[in-house]
Amino acid sequence: MKAFSFQRKHVIGAACVATVMLFAAIAGCAPEQAPQTDAAPAEATDATAEGTMAGYAEMFPLQYASLQQERTDENGIVKGHSIGQLRDICEAPLARDQNGDVLLGENGTVTASGYAYDEELGMYVLPEQTDEQLKETGLYSGCVACKSSKFNDIYAQQGASAFGSVYNKQAREIVNGEYFDCAMCHDGMPSADNLKANLVYFNALGDDFAANLVPKLAVCAQCHNSYDYRSRITTEADLENFRPYRYGTDLESVFKASYEDGVNFAKDEETGISTSYMVHPIIEIFQTSPMANLGVTCVDCHMPKTTDAESGTTYTNHFAANNPLENEDSLEYCLTCHKNQGIETTADMKAYAEQKADELARGYEELTAQAETFKAALEEAIKTKSKDEATLDKARELYAKASWYDHCINTQPSVISVGHMASMVDGSALVEAGEKACSEGMALIA
């Protein structure tokens, strides 16, 4: 067996040829594009099945082709929802956390294991793994809960245990390569008129908050939310009892529930200090933003209307991981509001957002430094027992909150990406909340 590290952007390529074999069946090019519009899909041929990604790829070639796009950000991290990308995330034996999410190192590197060199083929291949090996690797079906509507079928067969069961051959056959499939976000034949958040995980834990979101927010929120209880769900009672929004949907309330439940935090057993590892709390942050108050949604900026240069057809670009600051159609949409601020061109719009991102990056660096100082002081106070345990527990909670807000700003392993958070929220409020927790905590243990 072989373990090695490589940059994620090379996973489906020469740096890790074993994965080429694993993903080749589905990760190829999109079907040849034919003129069409969102409202008038082409009919599926006899060779394709309506209701499958293969069938929809033929019926909606422009949308499908854009769905398979990827981009690599300045930190070397691949962004996208392509079949190859998500198959890699869900199936490859990569180093993972307790929820099965892939651990990213500096510059987007990942660590892989389990590959064996095949002398005859002259390349590394991945042998079929046993359930025990999958468990050791952290390959659980719960990872698929926000990456395919087919997880709903696994859940229908296995019940709540599906979240913590290994993602073995039987489970993979249910998904059948249908990652980021149309049924995640559409109720029936894909159309702008039937958007719906269909994933069981989000709807089971999200309660009224999930149900009351407008569809163009809900379809993104079903994955891009703060709660991550998957590794803790083993029974139907767990699905009933875990309520991340029981105190409210604002960040302070969600932190309270998450900290009480011990979810989204890594606890140091020696000191009892918990540090947040939360990822993408997008909907909780966005819901009260000026953009949301104006009725702007995730889809509006990340999936803009685009005109195909070859056919002249206008369609909804399904590259949902699109960076709006790198997309002229997205920037044009931004100008529909921001022209009121005197911003006249897409270049000016991008410069404005980049300035906001730079301001947030500086605030983030200051918060991170304060949190590190606070943590060091807290560790010393715990070691020397300079305060009573009740005071130390309160300080532990405040440090956890500081790290929570730190991760609200940046959930990636490296520096803030241009425009990350800054374009949609008042980032200073996040920094101030984190710094407030640091100040209160330092005062407690002074």
Image (spheres, rainbow, N blue to C red):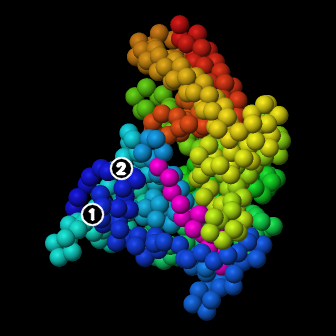
Quadrant in which the N terminus is drawn: bottom left
Asked if the magenta segment contains residue 71, the reply would be: yes
> Secondary structure beneath disc 2?
strand
- The location of residue 424, given as percent across then percent down, is 70, 38
Q: Please give the name of the residue rendered at 34% of the width and 72% of the height, measured from the top-left corner.
A: 21
Neighbourhood count class around disc 2 (C-alpha, 10 Å): few under 14, some 14–19, many 20 upward: some
- Location of mark 2 (residue): 7
Q: Is residue 197 left or right of residue 97?
A: right
- The location of residue 327, given as percent across then percent down, is 62, 49
> Secondary structure beneath disc 1?
strand
Using the image, determine if residue 361 lies above or below residue 78: above
Going by the numbered disc 1, the residue's amino acid type is Tyr
In the depicted view, which residue is nearer to us: 279 or 326? 326
- Give the CA distance from mark 2 to mark 1: 16 Å
In the depicted view, which residue is nearer to us: 364 or 353? 353
Mark drawn on residue 115 = 1
Going by the numbered disc 2, the residue's amino acid type is Gln
Magenta extent = 59-72
- The location of residue 400, given as percent across then percent down, is 55, 29
Q: Please give the name of the residue rendered at 65% of the width and 43% of the height, measured from the top-left corner.
A: 282
Q: Please give the name of the residue rendered at 74% of the width and 52% of the height, measured from the top-left corner.
A: 300
